[in-house]
Image (cartoon, rainbow, N blue to C red):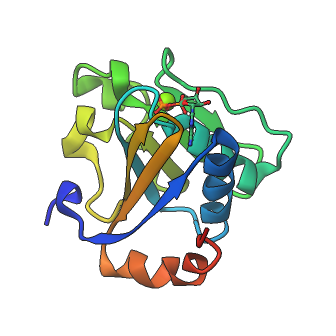
Amino acid sequence: MNWQASPFLFDRSTHSPEETQRLGGSLAAILQPGDCVCLTGTLGAGKTTFVRGLIQGILGPETTVNSPTFNIVSLYDQGPFPIWHIDLYRFENDDEWIELGLNETQEGLLIIEWPEKAEKFIRQSALVLNFDISQNNLKIIFTGTKNWSERLKPLQTSFEK
Ligand SMILES: Nc1ncnc2c1ncn2[C@@H]1O[C@H](COP(=O)(O)OP(=O)(O)O)[C@@H](O)[C@H]1O
Ligand SMILES: [Mg+2]
């Protein structure tokens, strides 16, 4: 099975950037090194906002999280494990994957915006979140393997609006 065809798990809606960030923060609690979280959806859909909450949930609220749009990769190595925040929007050539050092990220947490730009490198075991925004109303659809459904269970109640 392909990462893009991961089964639907559940969805949540948020109505402000703060709420989206909080949702990212609650996901942080169950992530561990070796995981890959992919975020799909149009430009401005709220992916980086969610990732900001997620990374701050692991490293602390004072951590600055900017979109790695131009450098493609941001590495946060001040925490318990390395966190790679990757934005593949400008990724064009498969050779760049190795040039960017992305084949050496097994020990860390991988967070990838625009995974479809380098689809052959995306792990089948990724948690895939799809972002669909209209006005301030953002719907986030969680998809992933059965393993993710188990791991996300403790969070589902705290995700309730
Ligand atoms: N419910 C919401 N959740 C997240 N962002 C929202 C929401 N409503 C409005 N926004 C705005 O949408 C923009 C999302 O930008 P960003 O997170 O960088 O998107 P992406 O990374 O998907 O391109 C921000 O300016 C944010 O303030
Ligand atoms: Mg972004």
Where 5 falls versus 77 (above or below)?
below
Quarter of the figure with the N terminus: bottom left
Q: Residue at x 16, y 59 (%)?
A: 2
Residue at (60% x, 80% y) in the render: 157
From this viewpoint, is residue 137 visible? yes
Q: Residue at x 24, y 70 (%)?
A: 7
Q: Is residue 149 above or below residue 56?
A: below
Front residue of this view, candidates 108 and 156:
156
* Ligand 1 location (quadrant): top right
Q: Residue at x 35, y 18 (%)?
A: 90
Query: Based on the displayed image, in which of its 4 quarters is residue 9 positioned?
Result: bottom left
Total numbered labels: 0
Residue 76 picture quarter: top right
Q: Quadrant of residue 158?
A: bottom right
Q: Observer-nearest residue: 80 or 146?
A: 146
Residue 79 at x, y percent in the picture: 75, 51
